Amino acid sequence: MTETTESAIGSLSFDDALAELQRTVAELETGGLPLERSIALYERGVALHERCAALLAEAELKVQQLVTRAGGALSTIDVRPEDAREVE
């Protein structure tokens, strides 16, 4: 996969990446594609799946990192998956 393709996938929102993944899977499921095209689509599908999984992990962390402030108001702490701490 090219660097441009990887950076393009890395900038997709969750909804866009999921829609593109669904289109990619549908094209693969039609069958009858040349081997090279099938491999390229499979690689793209893997990259799109990884993007969706990363965005879901980030969203889950944001939910887990909710902190109750004084007065009961909730706020989120902006964390990246690699900076996450275990929530008890």
Image (tube, rainbow, N blue to C red):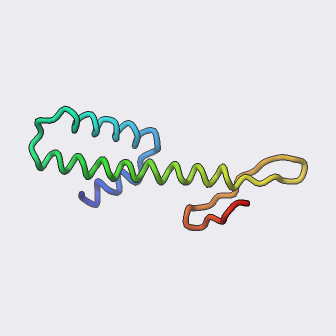
Residue 17: image quadrant is: top left
Question: At 15% from the left edge and 46% from the top edge, which residue is drawn?
Answer: 37
Q: Position of residue 46 (x, y in %)?
A: 32, 51
Residue 56 vertical position relative to residue 23 in the rendered view, above or below: below
Q: Is 66 left, or right, of 55 in this rendering? A: right
Answer with left or right where residue 20 lies relative to residue 64: left
Which residue is at a point 11% across and 36% down the rendered structure image?
32
Q: Is residue 76 left or right of residue 28?
A: right
Find residue 2 and report its horizontal and vertical position in percent.
24, 58
Q: Nearer the viewer, residue 34 or 71?
A: 34
Q: Which residue shows up at 34% across the image and 36% down it?
A: 22
**Coordinates of residue 38 in the picture (x, y in percent):** 17, 45
The C terminus sits in image quarter: bottom right
- Give the image location of residue 34, x and y in percent: 9, 43
Looking at the image, the residue that sits furthest to the right is 71
Outermost residue, front direction? 88
In the rendered image, which quarter contains the N terminus? bottom left
Q: How many marks?
A: 0
Q: Residue at x 89, y 53 (%)?
A: 70
